[in-house]
Amino acid sequence: MSTYGRRDFLKAGAAAAVAASFPLLPGCATTPSGARVVVIGGGFGGATAAKYIRLWDPSIDVVLVEREPGFTSCPISNLVLAGYASMREISHGYDGLRAHGVQVVQDEVVAVDAAKRTLRLARGGDLGYERLVVSPGIDFMYNEIQGYEPAMQAGGVLHAWKAGPQTEALRAQLEQMRDGGVYALSIPLAPYRCPPGPYERVSMVAAYFKQAKPRSKVLVLDANPDVTSKGGLFKRAWADLYKGLIEYRGNAKAIGVSPGAIRLEVEDVKADVLNVVPPHRAGDIAVKAGLITHNNRWCEVDWRSMESKKVPGIHVLGDATLSAPGMPKSGSMANNHGKIAAAAIVELLRGRAPEPQKIINTCYSFVSQKEAIRVSSVHQWDGKTLTPVKGAGGVSPARSEAEASFAWNWARTIWADSVG
Ligand SMILES: Cc1cc2nc3c(=O)[nH]c(=O)nc-3n(C[C@H](O)[C@H](O)[C@H](O)COP(=O)(O)OP(=O)(O)OC[C@H]3O[C@@H](n4cnc5c(N)ncnc54)[C@H](O)[C@@H]3O)c2cc1C
């Protein structure tokens, strides 16, 4: 674990001198005294870090490299599947970040040279940095599920676990499915992005079927032994609102897909719509940058600064990190990671040690169009890592319309805070 002693600041200063000698991207001016921070990924973690570095020190030159033209939110995307929200509502541009002076470059980072403190862009050209923030989200381990990639290319299976074209495709498949058909959702073993997300999806698809295709069925094939988050509240909602519509099977790990069927360890299960979420790991660029430290999947960080435990000068955020104890992979957390990194980078570039922060996570889940449930937790530095504060947080006592209204407000607030 890094200790942030005087030697680190001297190293940071030397690195600054190295990075300054690298050519700038055309159109990417830097302030004369400004250090340059490059951020990879304009999702909840990266966008927040880019914005808050500029807010807290406008002399720092911040370049955000994002491969997509805009930000599409996974939170609320399950409501799109039910027809309760639109793609337009979950899609946001990066003009808010530009207004804060962040230089947004639409491109893909294909390589990182941590020794030289440069990165390579897919469209050509290298970019130098003094500190790099890597918030690439997740990529999928398709080879863990036999036949997945060809089936996905043929449109026979979707994950819709990155909001965007697959969200729209899944909505279309649900609309086209016959009444009396089966929608199957396969959930990977934890840890995965958004612990309650799959069960919210189950609720949303069941709500749609109840209203539009009441003879249909939602089949949940969960690799975990039981519902991994807000279990009591979800099961109560399913029993009260969707009796006979949902069949839940625990310990049901998908190992393959073929046309119209999901292979489990013991049998093949047929369904009309296959929604199989493969196991995932930190996004590809984290692998290429040599940031993976745990289980070939996740990146360990110093939770006071989000700095990689393996590669100095690189801060890793969001779903790509090896989660601290009791910490979910969530947009709420990634947004907090962005602020921890922003504060730490501003301090480190000024030659000061970062202060540990206390952070809060809140995850809302809709169980019907009008009702939602919530889980929250508080995490604080214990001298080694961030750990949940005992007695702080918890789950909502029951589903309610008030929680649904809080959920929409939470979403609008975090979108504005991250990319606004
Ligand atoms: C269905 C669903 C529902 C969810 N609901 C909630 C919720 O209600 N509340 C909540 O808190 N969380 C929720 N989440 C989880 C949340 O979406 C993630 O935890 C969050 O997006 C993680 O943020 P991130 O910055 O790590 O990654 P992301 O938000 O995925 O951002 C990563 C970005 O990096 C870009 N990128 C990757 N590699 C490169 C590269 N090489 N070059 C350039 N750009 C690159 C990607 O294009 C992407 O824009 C949900 C997730 C799902 C799937």
Image (tube, rainbow, N blue to C red):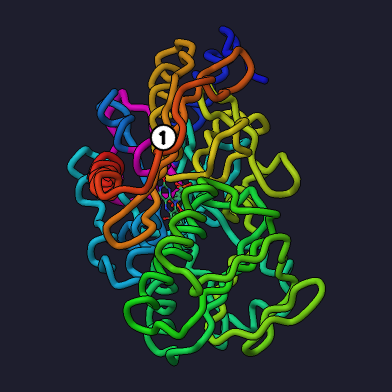
Q: Percent from the top left, x then y, of residue 380? A: 51, 19
381 vs 392, left or right, is right
Residue at 40% from the left image edge and 90% from the top image edge: 176
Q: Percent from the top left, x then y, of residue 153? A: 57, 83
Is residue 130 something one can see in this rendering? no
Determine whether 174 is above or below 308 in the image: below
Q: Percent from the top left, x then y, of residue 321? A: 58, 40
**Which span is picked out in magenta?**
23-50
Q: Percent from the top left, x then y, of residue 159? A: 53, 70
Residue at 65% from the left image edge and 29% from the top image edge: 309
Residue farthest along the top direction in this orientation: 6
Residue ID for mark 1? 338
* Magenta residue check for 364: no
Within the image, what quadrant is residue 2 found in? top right
Taking depth in this image into account, of 310 and 205 the one nearest to the observer is 205
Taking depth in this image into account, of 269 and 168 the one nearest to the observer is 269
Residue at 44% from the left image edge and 28% from the top image edge: 393
